Image: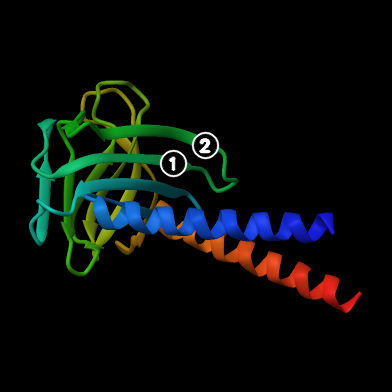
């Protein structure tokens, strides 16, 4: 009897949560879009990162470069890992719509959700030993480490210019999935109780 009440309460709560999320999403459409990117070098080094922009104001092509206020990009961060997946460094290249790097280069097609052209993220803040991913997407991307802040750097890894982009699931979608999962669990419990 008590499990039956719990099941009903869980189902009602899940339905209410899903409905609330749907109403909130309808009344406040999302403006910021968040995307992840990942890069894998031929020697096993890798980069993972994310970036965001306001999809209501962004043009089809977003092109950003240099330090200072960006035109459309709101944030961009990247972390580098060695072949054993040990962290090498994490950089907030763009934060609050401001680039921290003089060497920053970023080009993104919002309609195809692909990065293209010149790409330079991470270092460039004046710290000896910092890491950066640099090159041309579709041609060659190199993970490099600064040696002396005088223009000397070493290449740790590279690939043919391949980089992956994926959309971050929206919180409303995740909550909706959780709500439906809770309904499924409640329904299964109810069927199980009926068969006992």
Is 7 on the left-hand or right-hand side of 51?
right
Q: Quadrant of residue 126?
A: top left
The residue most toward the bottom is 195
Quarter containing the N terminus: bottom right
Answer whether residue 35 is visible to the viewer in this image.
no
Task: Check if mark 2's residue and mark 1's residue have beta carbons within 8 Å.
Answer: yes
- Gap between marks 2 and 1 measured at Cα: 6 Å
Q: Residue 129 at what x, y percent from top left?
A: 37, 26
Q: Secondary structure at mark 1?
A: strand
Residue name at image x 17 percent, y 54 percent: 55
Mark sitting on residue 87: 2
Q: Nearer the viewer, residue 73 or 99?
A: 73
Is 30 on the left-hand or right-hand side of 98?
right
Residue name at image x 18 percent, y 57 percent: 108
Residue name at image x 57 percent, y 39 percent: 86
Q: Quadrant of residue 99?
A: top left
Q: Does residue 78 sit above or below 188 in this rendering? A: above
Q: Residues within 10 Å of mark 1 (few under 14, many from 20)?
A: many
Q: Residue 61 at what x, y percent from top left?
A: 10, 59
Q: Nearer the viewer, residue 41 or 182?
A: 182
Q: Residue 81 at what x, y percent from top left?
A: 49, 43
Q: Residue 11 at what x, y percent from top left?
A: 62, 61
Colouring: rainbow
Q: Earlier in the sequence, mark 2 or mark 1?
A: 1
Q: Residues within 10 Å of mark 2 (few under 14, many from 20)?
A: few
Q: Nearer the viewer, residue 44 or 113?
A: 113
Residue name at image x 18 percent, y 62 percent: 110
Quarter containing the C terminus: bottom right
Is 47 on the left-hand or right-hand side of 104?
right
Residue under label 1: 80
């Amino acid at each position: 009897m008590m499990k039956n009440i719990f099941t009903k309460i869980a189902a009602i709560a899940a339905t209410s949560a899903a409905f609330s999320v749907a109403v909130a999403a309808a009344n406040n459409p999302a403006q910021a879009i968040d995307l992840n990117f990942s890069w894998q070098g031929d020697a096993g080094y890798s980069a993972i990162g994310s970036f965001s922009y306001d999809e209501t104001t962004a043009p089809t092509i977003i092109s950003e470069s240099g330090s200072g206020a960006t035109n459309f990009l709101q944030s961009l961060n990247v972390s580098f890992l060695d072949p054993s997946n040990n962290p090498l460094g994490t950089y907030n290249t763009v934060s609050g719509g401001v680039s921290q790097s003089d060497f920053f280069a970023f080009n993104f097609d919002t309609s195809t959700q692909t990065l293209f052209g010149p790409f330079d993220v991470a270092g460039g803040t004046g710290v000896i030993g910092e890491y950066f991913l640099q090159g041309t997407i579709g041609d060659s991307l190199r993970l490099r480490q600064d040696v002396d802040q005088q223009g000397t750097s070493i290449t740790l890894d590279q690939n043919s210019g391949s980089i992956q982009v994926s959309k971050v699931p929206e919180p409303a979608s995740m909550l909706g999935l959780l709500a439906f999962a809770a309904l499924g669990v409640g329904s299964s419990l109810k069927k199980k109780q009926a068969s006992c």
